[in-house]
Amino acid sequence: MACKTLIIDDEPLARIRMRSLLEAYPEDIEIVGEASSAMQAVEKIKELKPDLVFLDIQLPDKNAFEMLQEIQDEDFFIVFTTAYDNYALNSFEEDVLDYLLKPIAEERLQKTIEKIRALRPSAIQEPIGPFWEKLNQVLARFSNQYMQRIQVRIGEKIVLVPVDEIVRFKSEDKYTVIYMPTSQYVIDVPLIELEKKLDPQEFVRVHRAHLLAIDYIAEIQRGDVGRLCVVLKDKARTAIPVSRNFVKRVRSL
């Protein structure tokens, strides 16, 4: 089944070029729309629910990273396209599938298509092999590098929140909301930075915007549209969607 694909670029010729290249792969790519600005892109993504987005980083109203902060609950793979290579590091923090430099060569796009084929119908393979992941976890525990408490400023005081009492984290723009069983806190630390300081044996990323405490997961089930979601043990039985990027990790719990 072909991936529903959206092309986002402010240059008309670039969109034509990308469409022409992608039309060579009808079994893999179904182009469902185009957008020329971040505002239009947000509308199209919410309306069309694409599986894959070819996203130019430099857009006229805001850059791609700022735009992605507005649609963290949407679930799709990203291929960044740009004439500049200085965004490469940031792109890897956005769970991207690939990073293409303009002008895009047919041979280079072929490698992207191969990545798309490899992840259907499952999610993206994690870049770190199981052996190295386990080794890093063991070493981290011996070095006590993981956070045990999080400092939260409330007015003139600082509250120390025990990490083992946290149910989940949710990214909200440049802030992160901490959900406890009976309370919530907001800290000015991006979720991606916070995740690096938390034990991966205790917390699992299930979505670009959601990091969950594994012990608070009650069950994993399929939602109305067939995608996985995680149900928590809180009173509300909160259901959190699982992004395709993290399906393999969730299934391994």
Image: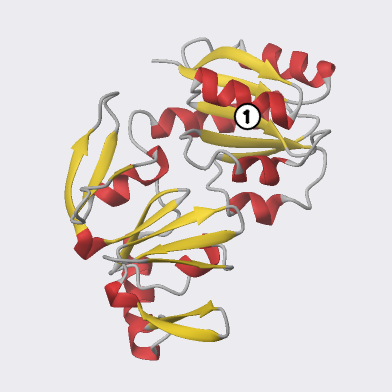
Q: Position of residue 226 (x, y in %)?
A: 26, 26
| Image label count | 1
Q: Is residue 213 left or right of residue 128?
A: left
Q: Is residue 18 left or right of residue 189?
A: right
Q: Position of residue 100 (x, y in %)?
A: 69, 37
Look at mark 1 in the image and give the residue it sits on.
Answer: 42
**Image position of 170 with respect to 165: above or below:** above
**Image position of 182 with respect to 105: above or below:** below
Asked which quadrant contains residue 110, the reply is top right
Asked which quadrant contains residue 118, the reply is top left
Q: Position of residue 232 (x, y in %)?
A: 22, 52
Residue occupying image coordinates x 54% and y 67% = 193
Q: Secondary structure at mark 1?
A: helix
Amino acid at the residue labelled 1: Val
Give the camera-side residue of 122 and 65. Answer: 65
Whether residue 3 is visible:
yes
Residue occupying image coordinates x 19% and y 54% = 235
Residue occupying image coordinates x 20% and y 48% = 237
Whether residue 124 is visible:
no
Residue occupying image coordinates x 35% and y 73% = 199
Q: Is residue 17 left or right of residue 120?
A: right
